[in-house]
Image (cartoon, grey):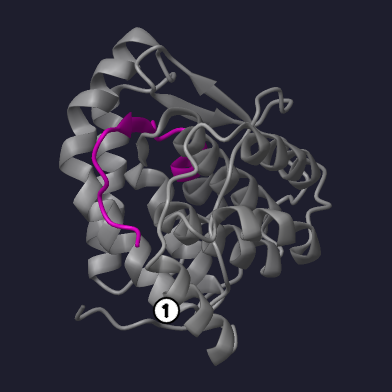
Amino acid sequence: MKRKMRDKKSVTFFAAVAILVVVSASGAYYFSNQTLEVDLVQQETQTENTSQTAEESEQQSASLDRSIVGDGSVMDEIARLASLSSQGRLTVGELETLRSMTIFDSYARHEFTEIRLMVEYGEQLHAGHALGFLSGYVSTGKYTLCPGHLLAHYYVFARHNNTHLADESFEVAKGQFEPWLPEARSFNERYPSGYEFDFIRNKIKDHFNQIEGGATNASDDEIDFLTEKTICVQSEFRYGHG
């Protein structure tokens, strides 16, 4: 990637915001700031700053990859963690059980890494959303397409100087954009978000252009929009992540 990270301006988030995942029959959903009432599910392993021994352990576990889709105990654990996150009380220590549950599933491992980092960074809201993505995967076996939300994560990781995951979030968002478009447009017609779909699409495209130009921060309002108002859909296919 030719983009170069610049200095970041801090963006403030309210840590104790609860999340509701609205799910349709088609598997599409969006996030809103409401009371948490849905089981959220799982995510991945390790932080970027883990020891070499832990990294070797994860590499070994990858060779024994097995799915956790449909595992009720994982869903229960994610629901417990989501409740803590909604109260702003989720800690790294609370994630140990989920880590052990996700270590043999490559997709879940990756999602767990993002959850752990968001908790370490004090980003409780984004940790809760990542738990929501994992929940969708464990409960349905499908993958989340949500380029707008990934762009919000780009800005969060950039703010915390995690260039690697910021750039990865951006690249995966670009890869998801085209397959996301028809499904998200259809969902917005059936379950209106309050915005014209072309407005949402153009917002995302604007952020692609800004980031390509070197942007590493956005306003609170812009990140909130990307987080809460850009539609997420589910897909049988995996675009990026692990």
**Bounds of the magenta span?**
225-242
Which quadrant of the rendered structure holds the C terminus? Answer: bottom left
* Predominant secondary structure, magenta span: loop
Tag 1 residue: 163
Q: Residue at x 65, y 31 (%)?
A: 33
Q: Count neighbours of disc 1 (C-alpha within 10 A) and say few if under 14, some if 14 to 19, many if 20 or more.
A: some
In x, y percent, where is residue 234? 34, 31
At x 42% / y 70%, what residue is drawn?
165
Foreground of the two, 62 or 151? 62
Quarter of the picture containing the N terminus is bottom left
Q: Percent x, y for residue 144? A: 38, 39
Identify whether 130 is placed above or below 29.
below
Residue 94 seen in this snapshot:
yes
| Image quadrant in which you'd find residue 28 | top left
User: From the viewer's perspective, is 44 left or right of 119?
Assistant: left
Residue at x-position 79% and y-position 65%: 93
129 sits left or right of 84 in the view: left
Image point 43% across, 46% down: which residue?
A: 67
- Give the secondary structure at mark 1: helix
Residue 241: in magenta span = yes
Most extreme residue toward the bottom is 52
